[in-house]
Image (cartoon, helix red, strand yellow):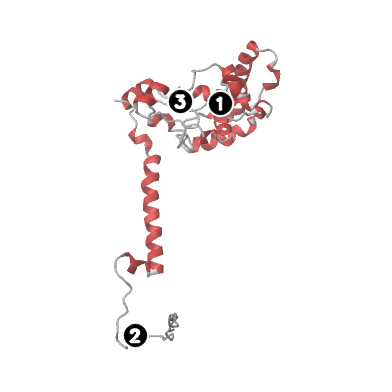
């Protein structure tokens, strides 16, 4: 015969209370701290605050660490408009703007990036990955027409490109009137714009956009529809990348 296993004996649930005067241990080390909810929460917030201060203060005091000879030109009103469009369209997700001091980075993209080059970028555009190439030194590398064609249809320039097309940039108009407020905010954040640049930001941007447009129109008379469109501002921004830092400052920081 086959004997079956005995039935499981269930122990009755008994509440065991500590005897009077007996100390109940909360554990040791971090276990003891975790058991003290209120104190642990306060200490957690303090540690977060201290860590945030350590991260933020160096950024706010960046000017103390730059050589006196280094001079970085701020973005023009049109370039700033183009930068905001660049951020809005999510270009930073696939493109970095930080050439590292690694041989293969330098050979492909040029001179390593310096701290002063992004001192007026809020937020910075260093990036965390490169689906596309780094753009820190793209200014002047390609003509305006190349950038126009590339943004409207990347496959026209690079057949195997996985970059999405941005045809709407060639139709949506630049919001010139918002530039005065944008430059005013940037000035409060420490960007050295003068009064005229802030007060007449829209006028300066229109003049600069007209120069870019005329250059494109001279190469292709059919491009009348791109006048005052966002693609003009993005082109101006891309052509400024890597061109703003003073040569003396860059050489000193790279030593």
Please identify the quarter of the rendering in which residue 251 is found.
Answer: top left
Residue 44 lies, in percent from the top left, at 39, 59
Furthest toward the front, the residue is 1
Residue 73 lies, in percent from the top left, at 45, 25
Q: Observer-nearest residue: 167 or 224?
A: 167
Q: Is residue 175 above or below residue 33?
A: above
Q: Quadrant of the C terminus?
A: top left
Q: Observer-nearest residue: 47 or 67?
A: 47
Q: Observer-nearest residue: 107 or 72?
A: 107
Q: CA distance from mark 2 to mark 3?
A: 73 Å
At x 45%, y 23%, the residue is 137
The residue wearing badge 2 is 18
For marks 2 and 1 on the same chain, the one whose residue lies earlier in the sequence: 2
- Residue contact between numbered discs 3 and 1, judged by CB atoms under 8 Å: no
Q: Is residue 68 above or below residue 188?
A: above
Q: CA distance from mark 2 to mark 1?
A: 72 Å
Crowd rating for badge 1 (residues with CA inside 10 Å; few <14, some 14–19, many 20+): few
Q: Is residue 234 above or below residue 146?
A: below
For marks 3 and 1 on the same chain, the one whose residue lies earlier in the sequence: 3
The residue wearing badge 3 is 73
Residue 225 left/right relative to 45: right
Furthest toward the bottom, the residue is 20
For marks 2 and 3 on the same chain, the one whose residue lies earlier in the sequence: 2
Q: Can residue 203 be seen here?
A: no
Q: Which mark is residue 91?
A: none
Crowd rating for badge 3 (residues with CA inside 10 Å; few <14, some 14–19, many 20+): some
Between label 3 and label 1, give the one nearer the viewer.
1
Label 1 sits on a secondary structure element that is loop
Residue 209 left/right relative to 139: right
Residue 249 lies, in percent from the top left, at 35, 24
At x 32%, y 64%, the residue is 30
The residue wearing badge 1 is 161
């Amino acid at each position: 015969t086959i004997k079956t296993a005995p039935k499981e004996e269930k122990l009755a649930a008994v509440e065991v209370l500590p005897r009077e005067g007996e100390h109940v241990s909360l554990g040791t080390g971090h276990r003891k701290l975790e058991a003290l909810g209120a104190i642990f929460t306060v200490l957690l917030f303090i540690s977060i605050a201290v860590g945030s201060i350590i991260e933020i203060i160096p950024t706010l005091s960046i000017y103390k660490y730059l050589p006196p000879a280094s001079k970085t030109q701020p973005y023009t009103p049109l370039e700033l408009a183009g930068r905001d469009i660049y951020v809005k369209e999510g270009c930073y997700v696939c493109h970095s703007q930080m050439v590292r001091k690694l041989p293969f980075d330098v050979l492909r993209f040029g001179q390593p990036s310096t701290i002063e080059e992004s001192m007026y970028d809020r937020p910075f555009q260093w990036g965390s990955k490169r689906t596309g190439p780094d753009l820190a030194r793209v200014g002047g590398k390609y003509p305006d027409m190349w950038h126009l064609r590339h943004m409207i249809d990347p496959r026209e320039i690079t057949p195997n490109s996985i970059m999405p097309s941005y045809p709407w940039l060639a139709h949506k108009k630049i919001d010139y009137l918002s530039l005065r407020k944008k430059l005013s905010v940037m000035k409060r954040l420490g960007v050295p714009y003068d009064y005229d640049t802030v007060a007449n930001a829209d006028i300066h941007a229109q003049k600069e956009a007209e120069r870019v447009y005329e250059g494109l129109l001279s190469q292709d008379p059919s491009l009348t529809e791109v006048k005052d469109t966002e693609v003009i501002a993005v082109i101006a921004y891309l052509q400024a990348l890597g061109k703003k830092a003073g040569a003396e400052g860059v050489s000193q920081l790279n030593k």
